[in-house]
């Protein structure tokens, strides 16, 4: 099995293409994006703590 450790630059690029927490069919006015989705620092563990690291 190949080990891949994505760095923050790659994760940021992926988030630009497909933003975290995007709902394909949000209810009008009911969509809520919690900080754990909108803030990258809350979505990611430090590189040294990642499983593939």
Image: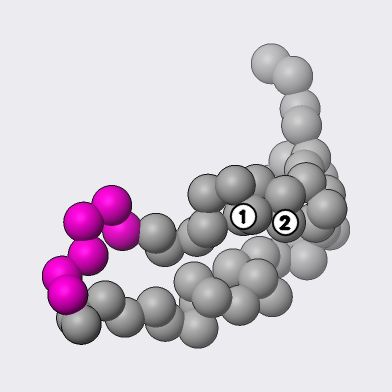
Q: Is residue 26 magenta?
A: yes
Q: Is residue 15 above or below residue 37?
A: above
Q: Residue at x 61, y 77 (%)?
A: 39
Q: Is residue 3 above or below residue 6?
A: above
Q: Position of residue 33 (x, y in %)?
A: 39, 78
Labelled pair 2, 1 in contact (Cβ < 8 Å): yes
Q: How packed is label 2: few (under 14 Cα within 10 Å), some, or many (20 or more)? A: few
Q: Quadrant of residue 48?
A: bottom right
Q: Quadrant of residue 42?
A: bottom right
Q: Is residue 13 magenta?
A: no
Q: Which mark, by number, is residue 12?
A: 2
**Towards the viewer: 43 or 21:** 21
Q: How packed is label 1: few (under 14 Cα within 10 Å), some, or many (20 or more)? A: few
Q: Which mark, by number, is residue 15?
A: 1
Q: Residue at x 31, y 80 (%)?
A: 32
Quarter occupied by the N terminus: top right
Q: Say whether residue 35 is visible.
A: yes
Which residues fall within the magenta stretch? 23-28
**Towards the viewer: 42 or 29:** 29
Is 29 positioned to the left or the right of 23 in the image? left
Dot 2 falls on a residue whose secondary structure is helix
Dot 1 falls on a residue whose secondary structure is helix
């Amino acid at each position: 099995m190949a080990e891949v450790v994505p760095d923050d630059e790659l994760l940021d690029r992926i988030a630009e293409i497909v933003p975290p927490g995007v709902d394909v069919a949000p209810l009008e006015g009911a969509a809520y994006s919690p900080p754990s989705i909108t803030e990258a620092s809350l979505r990611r563990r430090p590189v040294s703590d990642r499983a593939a690291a």
